[in-house]
Image (cartoon, grey):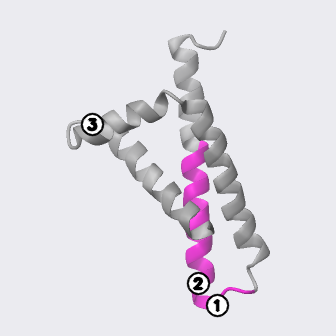
Amino acid sequence: MLLAATALLILFNIVYWTGKFFPDLWPALTALRSSLLAHWGLFMFLEFLAVASLFIDVVVKWDDYPRAQRNMRLFIAGLVCAGFITRFGLGVMDMYLVGEVQ
């Protein structure tokens, strides 16, 4: 289950950042990103749950992982956490700039 959550988080990050910075390269990803942003609050909540469970799993099972996998798992968890925090910050700034929050 955690592997599926990690794969979905990585896929979601790819779709979001590719649609944001390269909109002309893949118009289909831009359209998918726009439809995901229509339900921004729901996706942020679900992504928070997935990121938190991924990070907690890495911390709790740190000693169970082979030494070679520890750094890779920590790097992936950190990258996904950084992507979530950045996307959350950009989303809140966008909501303030558009005037959705008063």
Asked if residue 19 lies left or right of residue 58, the reply is left
Label number found at residue 69: 2
Local SS, label 1: loop
How far is mark 2 from mark 3, CA to CA? 35 Å
Single out the residue that lies furthest toward the front. 1
Mark 3: few, some, or many residues within 10 Å (few <14, many ≥20)?
Answer: some
Q: Is residue 22 visible?
A: no
- Residue 48 percent location from the top left of the image: 67, 47
- Which residue appears at 54% of the width and 40% of the height? 87
Locate the C terminus and report the quarter of the image it occupies: top right
- Give above or below for 74 relative to 93: below
Precedes in sequence: disc 2 or disc 3:
3
Q: Is residue 67 visible?
A: yes
Q: Are marks 2 and 3 in contact (CB under 8 Å)?
A: no
Mark 1: few, some, or many residues within 10 Å (few <14, many ≥20)?
Answer: few
- Which residue appears at 66% of the width and 63% of the height? 54
Label number found at residue 23: 3
Q: Amino acid at mark 1?
A: Pro
Q: Identify the residue under disc 1.
A: 66
Q: Residue 3 or 94: which is nearer the viewer?
A: 3
- Residues rendered magenta in the picture: 64-85
Precedes in sequence: disc 1 or disc 3:
3
Q: Are marks 2 and 1 in contact (CB under 8 Å)?
A: yes
Q: Are marks 1 and 3 in contact (CB under 8 Å)?
A: no
Local SS, label 2: helix
Q: Residue 12 or 81: which is nearer the viewer?
A: 12
- Residue 2 percent location from the top left of the image: 62, 67
- Which residue appears at 53% of the width and 30% of the height? 39
How far is mark 2 from mark 1, CA to CA? 5 Å
Q: Is residue 71 magenta?
A: yes
Locate the N terminus and report the quarter of the image it occupies: bottom right
